[in-house]
């Protein structure tokens, strides 16, 4: 079943950061008018001056009431708050409402009680950049990247097809799953790595305070393992606080895995340690191989 | 005090991997003859065919007995075993003996009981490459990189100056410290990150066995955090088993740091979590800044 070509008369994008700005650039060929809703006047001015969007407002109601497609490109709890407090009443019937928040369960729950007739679906494009902000917008940001779609109680077969067409227009690869599964997956591959990275930097910083040679000698291994600790604290706080259960579950499993390695190390059971580390190494190399066979 | 120019009549390199082969290439302009001691005939043939060395043998005694400088470029426990079992008796008086093992305390202890007259000093060049093996040898591998020097009971002032000259000839940056401090530093910046990376991959692999979407959606954050888990298992086993105490200490501190973040997360104390993550982020960014101001 083909998703068909994506088209919109009036696309509203709520939130003009890297993700929202890149959506505007990527979807421009498929829509007549793009309106942005954004509180920051600097981001609005940038988007207008660079013709990313046709109109920009700080008024949610004014921005979305004429739209036939609305993309919520804001932090997770801002998305939830818009859904719970106002947006359903502002939208026309049959409007496609999609969000791109990094966790899905709370958002999907909130979408489930929107007025009937709103075509609501959750989304999570698995992409990003070192830089953030609308200035870093890039029409190719979504190309070849996985784009998770999560059905809500307001997702009709037509909603799903429109969302698939939107993902296709972005050049992204749609992957459909439920919200619980999504949140567990991203806890493993993204939120757990962030917390480990932060706790590593805290440990190394404590050593570095006592001995500057720590910072002097730190090199590539530390650089890679600690990179995620430089992520935006507010953004990560928003994401972690909406995925606490899955993250805590993964942390418990991680501690178990680390404890097994530590026990083998301390007991100097080197044969067992090697037997345990070998399939771990193979799993990492296997994933890398798979990535290389499916270049983005 | 200048270290003076490095010169050797007869340099012996024990171990022809990436590190040993790169030593041969980098030191070639400063020595008359290079002999390699290596058990693997393939590595010996490669080194001779590509003129990295002038002679190659599998006999330690024959390889080192005429040398005035000997570099031990083997795994840590192979280095210790050579020092304990044979090499002192094979060496001429005043030979400079330096190793490049990744942990230092056990090696320095062993060097301390070499025959008086052997100019023994420990070394650890902080460099590497994705590829390993002599085929990846690179004359610039050590250039601009820190090279830790660790004094032994057999390190005279003359030993130290010869070692500094050798480091300078490699284009590396000498950093002198004692073995205990070195091992603690590398536990923090290298061995702890490796174990975290391995335990992360074990955790993610367990999730991935249950749900293939884990592998499908894993991207840049997982890639960087897990990269060290692909390191050679035998090499890491050798390193970890000779640095157990420092690694176990750092693991205990790490668990504490992780537990604090987890408690704040689970109790949903987001303000405190942000206050804790902010200086962590700044420490990481500060280190990065420092690295960029001191390009290699």
Image: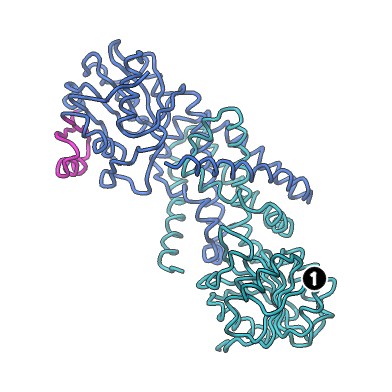
Chain colours: A blue, B cyan
Q: Is residue B236 left or right of residue A54?
A: right
Q: Nearer the viewer, residue A165 or A103?
A: A165
Identify the subunit bearing mark 1. B
Q: Which of B126 and A215 is in front in this view?
A: B126
Q: Is residue A20 above or below residue B277?
A: above
x and y percentages locating residue B32 in the rendered image: 65, 87
x and y percentages locating residue A216 in the rendered image: 52, 66
x and y percentages locating residue B60 in the rendered image: 79, 74
Q: Residue furthest front?
A: B49
User: Image point 60% across, 47% down: which residue?
Assistant: B196
Splitting the image into 4 quarters, where does residue A144 fall?
top left
Splitting the image into 4 quarters, where does residue B30 fall?
bottom right
Position of the N terminus of chain B by quadrant: bottom right
Labels in figure, total: 1
User: Image point 61% across, 60% down: which residue?
Assistant: B132
Q: In this view, does B140 lie above or below B29?
A: above
Splitting the image into 4 quarters, where does residue A242 fall?
top left
Residue A44 belongs to magenta span: yes
Residue annotated with mark 1: B82
Look at the image and give the residue range highlighted in magenta.
Answer: A33-59
x and y percentages locating residue A70 in the rendered image: 25, 25
């Amino acid at each position: 079943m083909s998703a068909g070509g994506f088209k919109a008369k009036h696309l509203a994008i709520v939130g003009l950061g890297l993700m929202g700005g890149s959506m505007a650039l990527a979807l421009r060929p498929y829509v007549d008018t793009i309106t942005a809703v954004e509180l920051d006047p600097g981001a609005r001015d940038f988007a207008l001056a660079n013709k990313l969007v046709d109109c920009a407002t700080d008024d949610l109601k004014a921005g979305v009431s004429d739209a036939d497609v609305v993309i919520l490109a804001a932090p997770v709890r801002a998305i939830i708050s818009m859904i719970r407090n106002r947006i359903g009443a502002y939208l026309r019937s049959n409007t496609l409402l999609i969000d791109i928040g990094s966790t899905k369960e709370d958002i999907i729950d909130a979408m489930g009680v929107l007025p009937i007739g709103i075509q609501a679906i959750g989304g999570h494009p698995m992409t990003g950049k070192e830089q953030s902000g609308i200035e870093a917008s890039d029409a190719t940001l979504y190309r070849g990247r996985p784009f998770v779609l999560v059905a809500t109680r307001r997702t009709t077969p037509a909603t799903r097809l429109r969302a698939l067409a939107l993902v296709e227009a972005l050049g992204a690869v749609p992957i459909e799953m439920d919200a619980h599964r999504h949140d567990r997956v991203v806890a493993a591959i993204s939120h757990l790595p962030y917390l480990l990275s932060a706790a590593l930097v805290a440990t190394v910083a404590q050593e570095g305070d006592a001995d500057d040679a720590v910072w002097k000698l730190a090199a590539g291994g530390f650089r890679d393992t600690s990179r995620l600790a430089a992520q935006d604290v507010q953004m990560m706080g928003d994401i972690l606080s909406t995925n606490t259960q899955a993250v805590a579950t993964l942390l418990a499993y991680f501690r178990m895995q680390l404890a097994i390695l530590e026990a083998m190390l301390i007991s100097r059971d080197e044969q067992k340690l090697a037997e345990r580390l070998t399939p771990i190494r193979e799993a990492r190399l296997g994933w890398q191989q798979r990535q290389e066979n499916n270049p983005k």
